[in-house]
Image (tube, coloured by chain):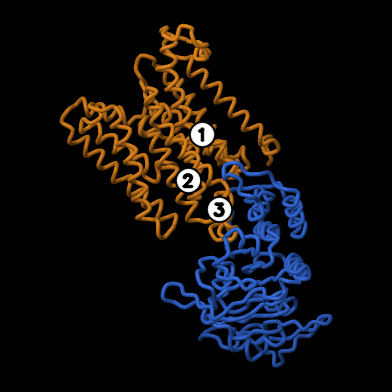
Amino acid sequence: MNSHALPGLLVQNLTLKRGDKTVVENVSFTLSRPELVGLIGPNGAGKSSLLKALAGLGQRGSDIRWQGRPLAQMTSAERGRTLAFLPQERSVVWPLRCRDVVALGRMPHQAEGLGFIRPAPSFEDLRSVEDAMRRMDVQAFADRPFDRLSGGEQARVLIARLLAQDPRLILADEPCNGLDPEHQLALMQCFRDLVAEGVTVVVSLHDLTLASAWCDRLLLLDTGKLVADGTPAAVLTSDRMAATYNIRIGHLQSDHRQLVVPIARLWQPEGGTASPADDATSSKVNCI
Amino acid sequence: MTNHFSRHPAQLAWLLALLCFGLFGLSLALGEVWLNPLGLLMPAGSDTQSVDAVILREIRLPRAVLAAAIGAVLGLAGAVLQGLLRNPLAEPGLIGVSATASLGAVIAIYSGASALFGLALPLSALAGALAAVVLLQLLAGRSGDRLVLILAGVAISSLAGALTSLVLNLSDNPFAAMEIVFWLMGSLTDRSLLHVGLALPFIVVGVALLLSCQRGLEALSLGDDVAASLGISLGGLRRRAILGTAIGVGAATAVSGAIGFVGLIVPHLLRPLVDYRPGRLLWASALGGAAFLLAADCVARVILPDRDLKLGVITATLGAPFFLWLLVRLRKDAE
């Protein structure tokens, strides 16, 4: 296929500043085929800033390219059809019905009309909205106002909005926050399904277990620099986790996957109490 | 939580349009003499110089047209600004347009220009409104931060208010001072087709700019970042909203004086009926605003016919208690 001739997402020597502070420094990577990419790193590592930049927000340069074209050169409508962005903040200003929130994801696909009169949603729009709601298991409250839902339900509705956009590239900032374990797993499964359908998915994650279980590839950021890039097994080494997160990790064998589990902090400030697993000599977790 | 209109959105538009139409007819018919509004549609050749025809054409018609147009632009601008600033308390006055337009008008009255040249007052008021836009763009244009925009609007309003007071203070002619005070109350009495011709083109341009914000405001309900990622140009949206408000509300203030509360109340009242969707609220608020101001103008003529009750006084005295009732009801709903 033609679209495979050029790498999907190419990031070259990207540096981002917030005021005087450099939040992302000289980051380069290429996502050449549909993958589920986990963006991991401690608080303040620059994950959110990087994701925002990848979404084309506030970007002027040509250091980020989608299929060879700098993001800054794409029209905003084209960008909207190509990539979808889920920020960490989950607010909807007005108590919109959930179905209307999800339907907002169709906006880049809809003709602008005259601006005064908006064309009715197409069959394609309705199908995408229903499909996204089904994937996120939110049909049950489709007609309820957004502000009457619990935090986790709201999160799922907003992810459904992201999916309804039918993008080629999904950029989600901590999408698992606030989801119960079942829906965390359902979300990761949904991302895997989308990858199989040809979508590239980049998610920032704090949960190393989810990252090791579901991602094809991990990008590890530390103080703005990309310190590791590779498969979960290659990135989540004990030494590296000790250096970046200051934690000791253990491994858990489940089916054919080796999951990573955080066990204990390595160094603690004066007066800190020992964590429960601190006395364990082995970092091996017994598998149930 | 669905209402009848969320299943039949077109019915709300028809209902509001019908309400406007009815009140427009009532506004033509109502006054010291009861007239048949259909008299306007008299075939050519019939008695166009009869007293009734002249009253209808020269007095009632401009008043009804202005009430509908001004109400529409006030309601619409309120809905747009509430969506843009994501603040249910926003109204056209918040960004300083009404205050600077009033200042322009007051200067025209004070300087005597309005006595020499009838259109000096509305033109000066319009210039005041546009000055507010230039100031706003200078103060808040670069950052695009909504808090900066609100604060800049408050600063401009305060300054214009202070200068208006200064003009009143310096006015040594009590009649000029009286005229200024009455003008500030807002009214549609004794407006001619000349005023309609002056204000209407600006109001139409303003309404068009404001209605073009529909898509952007819908997307903005998910926050700035998501709206931008959905393909909305936030800078363009803000410029259209502010310029549309200034041109439309500026022209409205120029011919009617400051009429408050319409832009605040009408969007509030209609928001539940459009499922809180900021885009669909725009059309509804324009129609609702027109109906509200037509109704208020009818009330102004009926309750104290010989005292020339000011329209701005009516909207505020009706509006404020109604707004309180609305807040109480909203709180009950939330519990």
The residue that disc 2 covers is: B81
Q: Please, what is the three-letter code of the amino acid marked with disc 1?
A: Trp
- Whether residue A153 appears in this view of the structure is no
Residue positioned most to the front: B45
Residue neighbourhood size for the residue with mark 1, other residues' Cα within 10 Å, grouped as few (<14), some (14–19), many (≥20): few
Residue at x-position 21% and y-position 30%: B112
Residue A4: quarter of image = bottom right
Q: Which chain is disc 3 placed on?
A: B
Q: Please, what is the three-letter code of the amino acid marked with disc 2?
A: Leu
x then y, percent, for residue B7: 71, 38
The residue that disc 1 covers is: B325
Q: Earlier in the sequence, mark 3 or mark 1?
A: 3
The residue that disc 3 covers is: B220
The chain coloured orange carries which letter? B
Residue at x-position 66% and y-position 44%: A119
- Please name which of the two marks, 3 or 1, marks the residue nearer to the observer: 3
x then y, percent, for residue B46: 48, 7
Q: Which chain is disc 1 placed on?
A: B
The chain coloured blue carries which letter? A
